[in-house]
Image: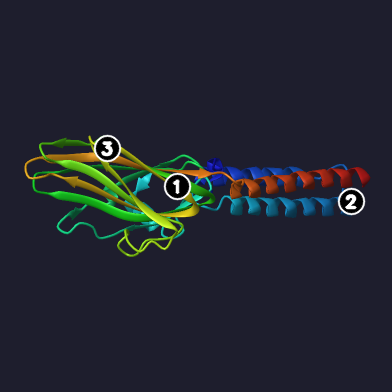
Amino acid sequence: MAWDYLNPDSTKVRVFTHLYASLVVYFFLIPGRTNTGKGEVLRLQLFCLIVATFGVLELACASSICTTGTLASYEALGAGGCEIGGDTIASFTTISGITGATPINPSLVAITPSGGTTDPVLTFDVSQTANAGSLLEAIFTYVISGPDNFTTDMTTLSNSSETVDGDVSDTQDYCVGGRFGADGVDGCTGSTSGALLTLDGIQNTDQGSFAGATTLSITDDFVLDGGTAGTASGGIFADQFTATSTVPEPNGIFLLSALGLVFAGFLKLHSLRRNS
């Protein structure tokens, strides 16, 4: 799991962290029974230890945790992206789609992240309606990378409705271990590529398995087709990935190291006090 409760983007957490650090420093800088020069040196050393430790904690939690947003806000994250557990989701880009289709505004595509390092999920929610003779499309690419090998990719489609000859679909193309070319479908630079298809009412789930890779390039093409005499409304499509865990999450390693440093410092200070 991610260390969400230490997310530095949270103002409340930042305030709490620094207040807590200040209280700890103040407690150990209170004049004790011995006001010798050695005692003051020990307190100064502890102050430096605490400042350095909280600096490590800041670095350990510096990555932005993925939160509910829109396709537009995720595009604004750029190549840095955000994290689900130890996985980085980044480089969201809207691309050109079907000729004649009306692009769905990225600000109208809601995104909800969930899961963790070995089972990240991105859920996309669209509420628009395509009437007869119209075609609405949201097509975009992104990259997911992590410390573990992704071995399974699944897409699902739900909460859609159609009348007469209307259709709602999502086609997902994936590139294992590399990236697609500019069109988001061709030119995969990885070991293999494939496509998953969901069509509401006919096939609402599709899944693919492949040899493990720590990076996947994904292109989702969500289409609302009103047909010649019908309508196509909304939909929730989700990209779900499975990875095989091999190493601890980086944030966890840094956090445990920092806490161990604090504990060792306290023990050393206690020992020096007894000998002073």
Mark 2: few, some, or many residues within 10 Å (few <14, many ≥20)? Answer: few
Identify the residue under disc 2.
36
Q: Mark 2 or mark 3: name the one nearer the start of the chain.
A: 2
Quickly name the residue at label 3.
203
Q: Residue at x 58, y 42 (%)?
A: 16
Residue 106: image x %, image y %?
A: 28, 52
User: Of all residues shown, which one is farthest toward the right?
Assistant: 275
Q: Provide residue 96's location: percent of width, then percent of height.
A: 25, 60
**Distance Cα–Cα, label 1 vs label 2:** 50 Å
Please give the residue where the numbered disc 1 appears in the rendered image.
Answer: 66
Q: Disc 3 residue type? A: Gln
Q: Quadrant of residue 103?
A: bottom left
Q: Secondary structure at mark 2?
A: loop
Asked if marks 1 and 3 touch (Cβ < 8 Å), the reply is: no
Image spot of residue 207 (x, y percent) = 37, 42
Indicate left or right for 206 with 86 as reference: left
Q: Residues within 10 Å of mark 3 (few under 14, many from 20)?
A: few
Amino acid type at image mark 2: Thr
Residue type at mark 1 is: Cys
Local crowd at mark 1 within 10 Å, few (<14), some, or many (≥20)? many
Residue 86 in view of the camera:
yes
271, 257: nearer the viewer: 257
SS at badge 3: loop
**3D distance between C-alphas at marks 2 and 3:** 78 Å
Which is more N-terminal, label 3 or label 1?
1
State the image quarter where residue 182 is shown.
bottom left
Q: Picture coordinates of residue 81 (x, y %)? A: 44, 55
* Count of all numbered marks drawn on residues in the image: 3
Say above or below: 142 vs 274: below
**Within the image, what quadrant is residue 68 found in?**
top left
